[in-house]
Image (cartoon, rainbow, N blue to C red):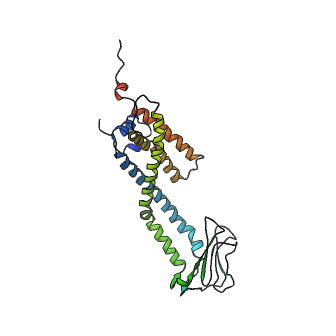
Amino acid sequence: MESYSIFSAPFLSFFHKDFYRDVGEKWGGKIFGYLILLQMFCWALILLHLQAGFSSWLKNEAPKLINQIPHISIVNGEASTDVEQPYRIVDPFKKGRVLFVIDTTGSVTELDDSMEMGLLTRDHLYFRQRSNLNEVRVYDLSKVDRFELDAAKVSNWADLIRKWMLLAFFPFAVLGAFLYRLFVGVLYALFGLLINAFLTEKSDFGQVYRVAIMAMTPVILLKLVKILTGVRIPMFWGICFVITLFYLAFGLFALHTSPKSETEPTAVA
């Protein structure tokens, strides 16, 4: 019997016993090609979805923040700007929240609790760390020969990110997800060996691992739908674990169900 196609695998992985038997017995290294193609499909849709959302944010929301950025010039380690100081960039989405302060006159010299993100003085840049709001990084501007920044430049940078984010992030996202699934597949294969111990016929680790990789397909597709729709599912990771274990057991039992025993009638003495 000819092996099933990898292109029918996402559909067949939900219900087809013969398909799981085929994966375990015949696929070999083909399972890795399938897994990377599946990740390419999923991440192409996810990044297109994120790109569309980012484009909408750039068009409708980002200008409220970006347009507050004044012209800032750093020449020979000294910053200057053409607005009255201290100049405050505020959060347009949360009233009263100051994100950043610019003061090159010397009246503001330290980052305090009223500044959410940072402070630019004549010769230093202060940034609050997002992972630890009590930690402040200080950058000496003395090594900066010349730098210019304004709202138009930031807007252009954001537009470049929007245009190229799919191509820039796609290979890294696919490779990272592929390696992650290979590792998780090993963990599920260990559960599969426990299930295998209760079966009359034993499979080798390679067969169990291939079935474990395929058993993750329904959950991978479920996660894709969840991301694209934005639906919140309580205890999602626990649900995914149970679903994968179910298909793992389903695939292993299918692997040890002989096609002959399913089709041939029992002989009558």
Q: Residue at x 54, y 65 (%)?
A: 57
* Apparent side of residue 232 relative to residue 113 in the rendered image (left or right): left
Name, please, the residue furthest toward the top: 269
Q: Residue at x 51, y 74 (%)?
A: 155
Q: Quadrant of the N terminus?
A: top left
Name, please, the residue furthest toward the left: 1
Q: Is residue 233 above or below residue 248?
A: below
Q: Residue at x 49, y 37 (%)?
A: 246
Q: Can you give x and y, in whole percent of width and height, for residue 264 in the image?
A: 34, 23
Q: Can you give x and y, in whole percent of width and height, for residue 215 in the image?
A: 45, 41
Q: Quadrant of the C terminus?
A: top left
Q: Can you give x and y, in whole percent of width and height, for residue 179 in the image?
A: 43, 53
Q: Can you give x and y, in whole percent of width and height, for residue 134 in the image?
A: 66, 68
| Numbered marks: total | 0
Q: Residue at x 67, y 85 (%)?
A: 106
Q: Is residue 232 above or below residue 75?
A: above
In which quarter of the view is residue 20 placed? top left
Closer-to-camera residue (215/140):
140
Q: Is residue 198 above or below residue 13?
A: above
Closer-to-camera residue (62/29):
29
